Amino acid sequence: MLWDLNEGKHLYSLEGKGDDIINALVFSPNRYWLCAATSSCIKIWDLESKSVVDELRPEFSNVGKKSNPPQAVSLAWSADGQTLFAGYSDSLIRVWSVGF
């Protein structure tokens, strides 16, 4: 849910998968985007159109079939909004170039 804190009112809700857990949220510094680190992927919502513009999913080569893949647990944008940094539960930081 997004709220207007000045007015104290609910603006709208963004939908994701029903079983996704949101670990972190960050707003883009130069676009009207909200980025969410969920249990399945990193989702980028365009807040004007209220739609998902991208889902970022790294490939994990060292994860067994019975184990769960690492989850993104922290997010940060570069100052120019072109690069997204994601900290994962396997203690690695993955870097995404985001230029739409």
Image (cartoon, rainbow, N blue to C red):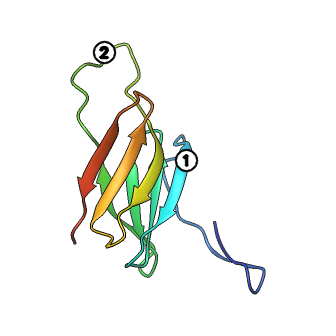
Q: Nearer the viewer, residue 77 or 40?
A: 77
Label 2: few (<14), some (14–19) or many (≥20) C-alpha neighbours in 10 Å: few
Horizontal arrangement in the rendering, residue 46 relative to residue 8 (left or right)? left
How far apart are the two marked residues, 1 and 2, measured between alpha carbons?
23 Å
Label 1: few (<14), some (14–19) or many (≥20) C-alpha neighbours in 10 Å: some
Label ID, residue 65 = 2
Tell me the residue at 55%/47% (across/down).
Answer: 22
79 w.r.t. 64: above or below: below
Give the structural element (helix, strand or loop) at label 2: loop
Position of residue 2 measured from the top left corner of the image (x, y, whole percent): 62, 71
Q: Which of 16 and 81 is in front in this view?
A: 81
Quadrant placement of the N terminus = bottom right
Q: Which of 38 and 25 is in front in this view?
A: 25
Tell me the residue at 47%/55% (across/down).
Answer: 36
Extreme-right residue of the structure: 8
Residue type at mark 1? Ile
Position of residue 98 measured from the top left corner of the image (x, y, whole percent): 25, 63
Position of residue 77 measured from the top left corner of the image (x, y, whole percent): 39, 62
Horizontal arrangement in the rendering, residue 23 relative to residue 80 (left or right)? right
Horizontal arrangement in the rendering, residue 47 relative to residue 52 (left or right)? right
Q: Quadrant of residue 13?
A: bottom right
Quadrant placement of the C terminus = bottom left
Horizontal arrangement in the rendering, residue 42 relative to residue 65 (left or right)? right
Position of residue 9 measured from the top left corner of the image (x, y, whole percent): 75, 80
Label ID, residue 22 = 1
Give the structural element (helix, strand or loop) at label 1: strand
51 w.r.t. 90: above or below: below
